[in-house]
Amino acid sequence: MKTLTVIGARPQFIKASPISVALKEAGFEQVLLHTGQHYDINMSQIFFDELAIAPPDINLGIGSGSHAEQTAGMLVGIEQAINYHKPNWVVIYGDTNSTVAAALAAAKLHVSIAHVEAGLRSFNRTMPEEINRVIADSISSILFAPTQDAINNLRNEGIPNERVHLVGDVMYDASLMHGRRADIQSKILDKIGVQPHKFILATVHRAENTDIQHRCQAIFEGLDLISHNMPVVLPMHPRTKATLERYGILDKFQHSLRIIDPVGYLDMIKLEKSAALIATDSGGVQKEAFFHKVPCVTLRDETEWVELVDLGWNKIIPPISAENIADAIRSMLGTVGQNANPYGEGNAANKIAQILAEY
Ligand code: UD1
Ligand code: UDP
């Protein structure tokens, strides 16, 4: 049995890490295709090096561009790869343009698609990710849902039960798989000069926050207010850096916030574990805050990971005003949520490999 795994963006490298190990153990022949959606060393290569992921067999080198440019380029390259390698399964992750391109290319060639992290919904169709998810889920042959809520979403959309499997979250697998190494190897706290539990960790990259200037400004001004009481460490996504430069406000916030380049996964885990609170618009980082039992403020209008809010580990703050954001961070500092395990036992990757092997 042969799989063609399609990845292209930072969180997909992390999700692919436990799955590539599980597929290997289950005896699959694997072909890895990197679309090249992310390409900076610290957005791509660092994850292959740190997480011991095999180098991609194919790198399409698509790079940045409009949605149409990116997706169209990927479609052509992925179609060629499927025709050449003739996989039994195309494995896709999450909700990026790389995900939807692979789903479309495979579906048109009648190749079975396995969608990892299926069923998530924000119910906000202005998000490119929501469009990508809905399309990928509707044409995937088998859907691996991380949570019961994701299962319910798929059921409500009429996706037949036999195509859907509740397996848990592969990001939990990844954090368990690499967490101890982060403790031992990462020197990031010394490097940036912060004390454990005495700083806020922030990440911002969503299009709806970066591309709308008043939202972007509210977030950065809110973090700026907080930085008067506690250092704010912000590994900055290249999209956000480019946007702040365009708005002419990067220099201003570089003085108050500890803005650093994007870090590798081990340093990121160390930062997350050591933060007093995490403020983010990232999907993955919201969950990692919970894995490490750190309170989180989500800088968005909604979240797909609703169980985090229900359990009291996460508070959603629409980025409308700096004061609201600063108040939310202050109110969540030092809080703990309920004990629960909504993301499985850390064996999602093995379950996925087993189900695919039995299909
Ligand atoms: C993409 C995903 C998003 C995911 C995120 C993970 C889509 C539509 N969005 O968003 O769901 O949460 O990845 O990080 O697929 N850039 C660089 N170097 C890089 C990569 C990007 O400079 O290596 C800059 C470019 O200016 C580019 C911009 O970031 O135009 C946005 O990159 P892109 O991959 O289009 O979207 P992300 O915002 O990264
Ligand atoms: N991440 C990382 N370095 C960083 C920022 C994030 O390794 O500087 C990791 C993070 O730990 C998580 C994943 O990247 O595993 C989340 O990716 P991102 O926030 O880019 O995308 P999203 O999850 O929102 O799609």
Image: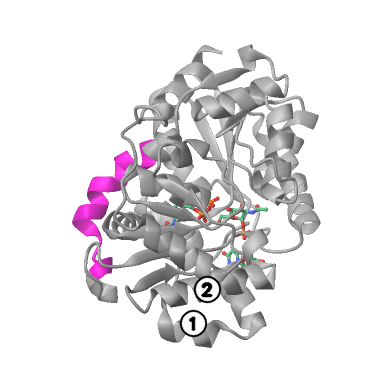
Give the residue at x 50% y 61%. 43
* Relative side of 183 to 78, left or right: left
Q: How far apart are the two marked residues, 2 and 1, measured between alpha carbons?
A: 7 Å
User: Residue 111 falls in which quadrant of the image?
Assistant: top right
The residue under label 1 is 253
Query: Which image quarter is the C terminus in?
Result: top right
- The extreme left residue here reads 184
Q: Are marks 2 and 1 in contact (CB under 8 Å)?
A: yes
Magenta-drawn stretch contains 183: yes
Identify which amino acid the numbered label 2 is placed on.
Phe
Residues in magenta, as a range: 173-189
Of 259 and 215, nearer the camera is 215
Q: Is residue 248 above or below residue 313?
A: below
Of 140 and 204, nearer the camera is 204
Q: Is residue 52 visible?
A: no
Please, what secondary structure does the residue beneath circle 1 have?
helix
The residue under label 2 is 220
